[in-house]
């Protein structure tokens, strides 16, 4: 779904995202997109809390509040402006990836660290807890 350059020890403000049409967490597909110098601006105050996981913190999941809608402004890999108004899962993904570019992981955004769980134990929270959000 997403990977930020700092996750692979590259000191660039760059991320790659993709949400395939087959991903049931999203109502819209997002093609493989390179984001250079992305900036995310919340649209409205509504926040949604959902399970997130991350390749940087393997095997764990936690409940993370994110803005329900956000505007993404960046450059694509050819240097052209890229602007997207995102909602739902797409908005969550871009906020998650931009957090990496700012030196944060989803744990820093959690309101209640008691929801931090090992993936193998999440069956008690229901099927939605097994899905990994973000990267």
Image: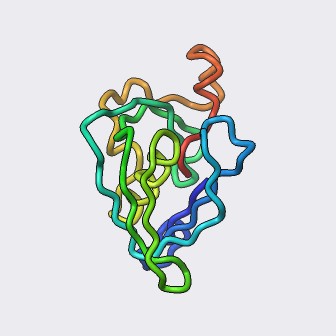
Q: Residue at x 45, y 59 (%)?
A: 84
20 lies above or below 103: above
Image position of 85 (left or right of 78): left
Residue 94 is drawn in which quadrant?
A: bottom left
Q: Residue at x 38, y 38 (%)?
A: 68
Residue 8: % across, % down: 55, 70
Residue 99: % across, % down: 37, 57
Residue 77 is drawn in which quadrant?
A: bottom right
Q: How many marks?
A: 0
Query: Please, which residue is most extreme toward the bottom here?
Result: 78
Along the viewing direction, whichever of 61 and 69 lies nearer the viewer? 69
Q: Residue at x 48, y 82 (%)?
A: 80
Q: Residue at x 33, y 63 (%)?
A: 102
Query: Please, which residue is most extreme toward the right here?
Result: 22
Residue 120: % across, % down: 65, 28
Image position of 118 (left or right of 113): right
Image position of 130 (left or right of 135): right
Residue 88: % across, % down: 48, 39
Along the viewing direction, whichever of 34 and 2 lies nearer the viewer? 34
Residue 24 is drawn in which quadrant?
A: top right
Q: What colouring method underlies this structural image?
A: rainbow
């Amino acid at each position: 779904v997403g990977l930020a350059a700092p996750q692979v020890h590259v000191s660039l403000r760059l991320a790659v995202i993709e949400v395939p049409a087959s991903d049931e967490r999203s109502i819209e597909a997002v093609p493989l997109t390179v984001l250079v110098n992305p900036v995310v601006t919340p649209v409205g105050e509504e926040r949604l809390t959902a399970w997130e996981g991350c390749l940087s913190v393997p095997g764990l999941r936690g409940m993370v509040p994110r803005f329900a809608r956000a505007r993404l402004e960046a450059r694509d890999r050819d240097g052209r402006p890229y602007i997207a108004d995102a909602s739902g899962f797409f908005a969550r993904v871009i906020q998650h990836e931009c957090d990496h570019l700012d030196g944060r992981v989803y744990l820093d955004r959690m309101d209640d660290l008691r929801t931090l769980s090992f993936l193998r134990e999440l069956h008690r929270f229901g099927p939605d807890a097994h899905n990994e959000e973000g990267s």
